[in-house]
Amino acid sequence: MKNLLVTGGAGFIGSNFINHLLSKRDDLKIINIDSLTYAGNLENLKQSENHPNYSFVKADITDRESINNIFEQYNIDNVINFAAESHVDRSILGSEVFFNTNVMGTNVLLEAAKRFGVEKFLQVSTDEVYGSLGPEGKFSETTPVDPNSPYSSSKASADMMALSFQRTYGLPVVITRCSNNYGPFQFPEKLIPLMILNSLNDKKLPVYGDGLNIRDWIYVIDHNKAVEHVWEKGRIGEVYNIGANQEMTNIDIIKLILNYLDKSEDLIEFVKDRPGHDRRYAIDSTKIETELGWKPEYKFEEAIEKTIDWYLENKTWWERILSGEYQEYYKLQYKNV
Ligand code: NAD
Ligand code: DAU
């Protein structure tokens, strides 16, 4: 039985990961630690909360003493680090918490893993560490790291630190760098849920710049299956890109959502661009596909409808979020919309 520490497991990707793993495996115990920031929501884990192989501890990854105690008490032998401040716009409004959590928090986890010893430490990173692409080409694992936002630079710093722990101390680190996720339980600050909920509520849809920025979309379950592959089979000291070859402009996604919900395109409002806005992301995932045998299963056209349906069916989940702290953030970020 493995004792897997999953950090940030009450967030969007981490909660989907835990729900997925516990529904199909009985050879591991999952210890989920999360400090429950605005983005952490234990409601996401309803299907897992009573599972005999699941424990939750409210803890902050920057808290060295708590983290060391958790490693000792639960005999942690594997780590998957999802915990992070994850939203680019929030990192532009204020960067400090991004460096505390994403850099110092990762340092605390790496030090604990070194001290107690682990089989594997998987650092969940992002394609944003590579910066921005022009109209041609894709990010491969050898593309130089060149981040543009406080968020992506904090993630790039954590990647460098994790690799240095592998090279210096022999810590068994692997890194994944995935493209933009979508699916159930995504916090409504991110493009797809924001546009779904604003459309449903007949609110304006704030499109940054000309709306022609491109992201390479992957359904969250595909991402999580890839993380599982890398955790089990990924070579130590390696980076694995994860993507599903589904590039879309923002405006095309927004029009698709409006069309599906039978709403007018008059809701679209072009607003001031995001500072340092990366133009295009595209992922080359040949390495994980050929080396580890992973392949994405979901097509964007089907999984986006599945995602919109999920938000239609889970109104109480998002209504609670929209009525809380989110209102303050929305006012600050979208002053004139
Ligand atoms: P999220 O914001 O939905 O969830 C983050 C979780 O981390 C929350 O539950 C939050 O409470 C927790 N957390 C934050 N600070 C913490 C701290 N100091 N201690 C303990 N817990 C803390 O983020 P997400 O979209 O699920 O992203 C998860 C990971 O995947 C992040 O590392 C992110 O960089 C990476 N990633 C995200 C995407 C994407 O499209 N969302 C793509 C590639 C990689
Ligand atoms: O690529 C992986 C990254 O994807 C992850 O590492 C991040 O955690 C995740 O937040 C995401 O970052 P992005 O900045 O690409 O995602 P976001 O949903 O914020 O924006 C997607 C695109 O939509 C981007 O071009 C900006 C645009 N946008 C976003 C918002 C919130 C708008 O036009 N209007 C908006 O209101």
Image (cartoon, grey):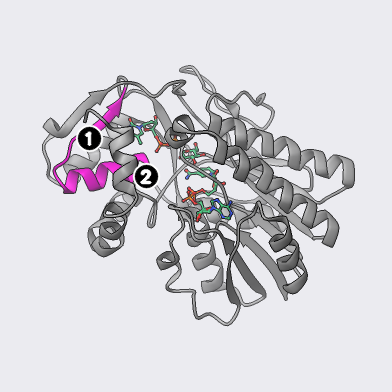
Residue in view at x 55 percent, y 49 percent: 295
* Relative to 134, 203 lies left or right: left
Report which residue position mark 2 lands on: 300
Q: Is residue 320 above or below residue 196?
A: below
Relative horizontal placement of residue 23, taking residue 314 as reference (left or right): right
Give the label on residue 230, or none: none
Across and down, in percent, residue 234 comes to 72, 50
Question: Quadrant of the image for the N terminus?
Answer: bottom right
Q: CA distance from mark 1 to mark 2?
A: 21 Å
Q: Residue at x 87, y 47 (%)?
A: 170
What residue is at 66 percent from the left and 48 percent from the top?
105
Q: Which mark is residue 205?
A: 1
Which amino acid type is marked by label 2?
A: Phe
Which segment did they paint magenta? Answer: 190-208
Q: Can residue 250 be spotted in the picture?
A: yes
- State the residue in front, 3 or 226: 3
x and y percent of residue 11 in the render?
A: 48, 56
How crowded pointer 1 is (Cα within 10 Å; few <14, some 14-19, many 20+) is rated as many
Q: Is residue 316 above or below residue 303?
A: below
Check the image and report above or below for 269 versus 11: above
> Does residue 194 appear to the left or right of 135 in the view shown?
left
Percent x, y for residue 239?
70, 40
Image side of residue 274 versus residue 288, left or right? left
Query: In what quadrant of the picture does the C terminus appear?
Result: top left
250 up-or-down from 85: above or below: above
Helix, strand, or loop for circle 1?
A: strand
Which residue type does callout 1 highlight?
A: Leu
Residue lying at 79% horizontally and 60% vertically, measured from the top left: 119
Mark closest to the chain's N terminus, 1 or 2: 1
Queried on whether the Cβ of the residue with tag 1 lies below 8 angstroms from ligand 2, the answer reads yes
Percent of width and height locating residue 218: 45, 44
